[in-house]
Amino acid sequence: MVKVFLVEDEFVVREGIKNNIDWLANGFDFCGEASDGELAYSMIQKTQPDILITDIKMPFMDGLTLSRMVKAEFPWIEIILLTGYEDFQYAKEAIRIGVSSYLSKPISGSDLLREVSSVSEKVEERRAEREATKRYEEEMKERNELDKQAFFGKLVSSNCGASELIEMAKKLSIDITALKYNVLLMKVWSKKHEIGEFSNSILKIEEGIRTIATRNGAICFNLDLEGLALLFKGDDDSTINTNIESTIKELLGLFEKYNNIRYFGGIGQSVNRITEISTSFSWASRAFAHMYLTSDNGFMVGSEEGLKVEKEDIILSEIDPKHIDRRLVKEFLRRGEASETEFFLEEFFNGMGKNAIRSTMLRQYISMDLYFCVTDYILNELGLSRDELDKQISAPNAEVLGDEKKTFDYMKEIMNKALLIKQSNAIGRYRDIMNEAVAYIEKHYAEEELSLNSLAAHVNFSPNHLSAVFKQETGQPFIKYLTDYRMEHAKELLCSTSKRSNEIGQMVGYKDPHYFSYLFKKTQGVTPTQYRNGTREEE
């Protein structure tokens, strides 16, 4: 119900208004009263009424001052002013504040009820508009997540200045300013599903991660198909470390509820500047690369002490054979991204010793083994022919093996080529998936329940994966594509039928007529009625 609050210093008048009108029977909730503006203000903050009825002349705080303060904090509250004074200046100020009605006392209960009923129509309209706006923002979350992902890429690239990053963050409604920052990178995936496949459990886990991150003061970004980046910010290292520890503790509790999942996280080092977040990201990435070097779940801190084995002189007998495991490389090629290759290789070597790459014998052995591993993956898992493979990747030669940097660059190059071939192979599959997705939209667009998640489940893609592919293939996020598709059909029906707009809204997937009208005007610039009338005028 519409809530009404009364402020009147004359006790008899206040009691008359409160008791002589059957508020409940007329659909109103009389939620409170006060004898002056000062007492009323704190009560209004708690009750947050829809309609405020207040006298102008009162002790301690008058009605105009109260109205000004209420409108500043709660602009949606409609205000009815009561006054026994015929003063044009009062009326002028009331209009400037945004008061709905200006009534002279004495006023009968029936006249006041009539005015309150009229104002309540505005309340309902604004409430419907607020709900529509909230729903629109919720639906547009997908687009916002894609924009946030692009912003995070710039945040960790070291190519933008602080002012530019702050400005970009403001456009996304992100408060990026702080005295300290740290980054946590993580992936969670199902051992029962292929990479990028739809998993209801992973979907619920990701929702839980976002909730936990927000609760602990972190900003959450999509990283890639299965990855998330949490940016922690605060006034000091202690606050950030406490929040990270609390987050990890809650995450472990969340993960315990699910079987057959794997998770791994890499934590960076705290930095002082926005432009240094890229450094924290680098440390987190180094730790994160160990996901491919172990079969264990867990979180690792990226630090010089924690990641590197300090061995100045390499003795081959001291090297742990598990670090020269072809399966680790294969796991990276299946799940890794090109942006992670350098970190993976560095940690791959660091596991053997700080100067492992300086050993000519070891360098030659690992380079050749990596070459055979990559070619085996390309031939047998990606299905490339031997001739096509030889055109793109060649075995390491003496010149490459004779120099540490050239050897490292060679290994990075052939692994990235394998990842590029994997990506190219996926494009054909993506086109098939997109054709299926578009066909599904065309068939089910009239169903209000159609969403990114339901479409992802249909095509067996994770929502993040589908969102990225959809934007890549169509140039726009799924929700914009669906909204545009529905609006085009709505415009056709407005032009070719005499059906009412609320009926047309239901026919294109919007059961709520208020939301359909709101969305139509938001996307087309005019209401459905204006569009129909304008089209007829043109004809």
Image (tube, rainbow, N blue to C red):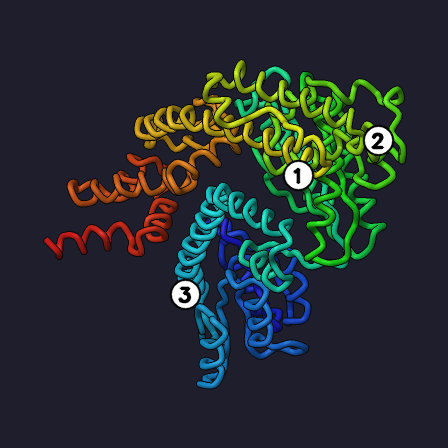
Q: Nearer the viewer, residue 191 or 120?
A: 191
- As displayed, is residue 9 above or below residue 445? below
Q: Are marks 1 and 3 in contact (CB under 8 Å)?
A: no
Name the residue carrying label 3.
111
Q: Residue at x 67, y 16 (%)?
A: 260
Horizontal side, residue 321 vs residue 423: left or right: right
Q: Residue at x 21, y 40 (%)?
A: 493
Q: Amino acid at mark 2?
A: Gly
- As displayed, is residue 429 above or below residue 133? above
Name the residue carrying label 2.
353
The residue most toward the left is 539
Q: Amino acid at mark 1?
A: Thr
Which of label 2 and label 3 is nearer to you? 2
Horizontal side, residue 209 vs residue 16: left or right: right
Q: Nearer the viewer, residue 497 or 17?
A: 497
Q: Residue at x 13, y 52 (%)?
A: 536
Locate residue 357, reporting x and y percent.
77, 32
Q: Are marks 2 and 1 in contact (CB under 8 Å)?
A: no
For mark 3, give the secondary structure: helix
Locate residue 228, reporting x and y percent.
64, 37
- As displayed, is residue 199 above or below residue 60? above
Mark sitting earlier along the chain (2/1): 1
Q: Amino acid at mark 3?
A: Asp
The numbered mark at residue 211 is: 1
Horizontal side, residue 135 vs residue 238: left or right: left
**Res 243 visible:** yes
Q: Nearer the viewer, residue 32 or 400?
A: 400
